[in-house]
Image (spheres, helix red, strand yellow):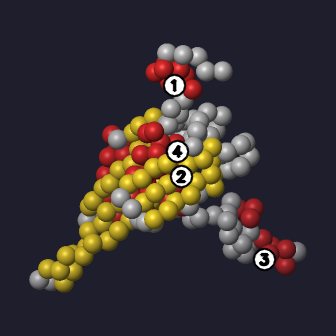
Amino acid sequence: MANERNRSDKKGDRSRGDKGRGDKGGRGDKSRGDLIDDVIKVRRCAAVVKGGRRFSFNALVVVGDGKGRVGWGYGKANEVPPSVEKGIKDAQRNMSNVPVVDGTIPHRVFGRFGAAKVILIPAGPGTGVIAGDTVRKVCVAAGIENILTKSFGSNNPANLVKATLQAFDQLRSRQEIERLRGVTLS
């Protein structure tokens, strides 16, 4: 009896709500109301002053509703949490629409910002988001479930986010192309 009690009191007991190894410990994307926000990169900057070093932090954040709206923001502050909050506010102001058709994008598209280049290719159901970490976070925030991507050139997270969003801006849905051309597509 005592042996069973000791086994259940151990730290690794799953019955008390412990998540185990797969839990990220609260990191990653969080949902704020109907928006999904994810921190892409946090950087520390040091200014040398008379008493030593004064640190400031800047955060690159991507925000989306998971239904075709996504934006990026950049926040700077003396602590990490305020810089992330400022980045989220900036991202909410700079959101754009992405046409999502059956969980993927309507056609192949190429985006470029600086030396970062990104190719986005539509994928069939069940493929998932095949992308690097930065591009994946942008696609998930936009609500894309199936996509193939490849990034070339620079792997700078800020430039990859901007290249991905520049590619999203080039996307056109079938209805939008029909309206612009004044024809019906079969």
Tell me the residue that label 1 is attached to: 177
- Farthest residue toward the left? 50
Give how far apart the Cα atoms at labels 3 and 2 are: 55 Å
Estimate the x, y position of residue 107 in percent, counting from the top left: 58, 39
Q: Going 72% across and 72% down the picture, which residue do you hit? A: 12
Q: Is mark 3 on a helix, strand or loop?
A: helix
Tell me the residue that label 3 is attached to: 6
Tell me the residue that label 4 is attached to: 109
Tell me the mark number nearer the camera, choosing from 3 and 2. 2
Q: Is mark 2 on a helix, strand or loop?
A: strand
User: Marks 2 and 3: in contact by CB < 8 Å?
Assistant: no
Residue 172 visible in the snapshot: yes
Q: What element carries label 1?
A: helix
Tell me the mark number nearer the camera, choosing from 1 and 3. 1
Give how far apart the Cα atoms at labels 1 and 2 are: 21 Å
Q: Which of marks 3 and 2 is nearer the N terminus?
A: 3
Tell me the residue that label 2 is attached to: 119
Q: For residue 13, which quarter of the picture?
A: bottom right
Quadrant into which the N terminus falls? bottom right
Q: Which of marks 2 and 4 is nearer the N terminus?
A: 4
Quadrant into which the C terminus falls? top right
17 relative to 81 in the view: left or right: right
- Give the amino acid type for the residue marked by disc 2 in the picture: Ile
Residue 28 visible in the snapshot: no
Q: Earlier in the sequence, mark 1 or mark 4?
A: 4
Give how far apart the Cα atoms at labels 1 and 4 are: 15 Å
- Give the amino acid type for the residue marked by disc 4 in the picture: Val
User: Marks 4 and 2: in contact by CB < 8 Å?
Assistant: yes
Q: Going 71% across and 49% down the picture, which residue do you hit? A: 127
Q: Which of marks 1 and 2 is nearer the N terminus?
A: 2
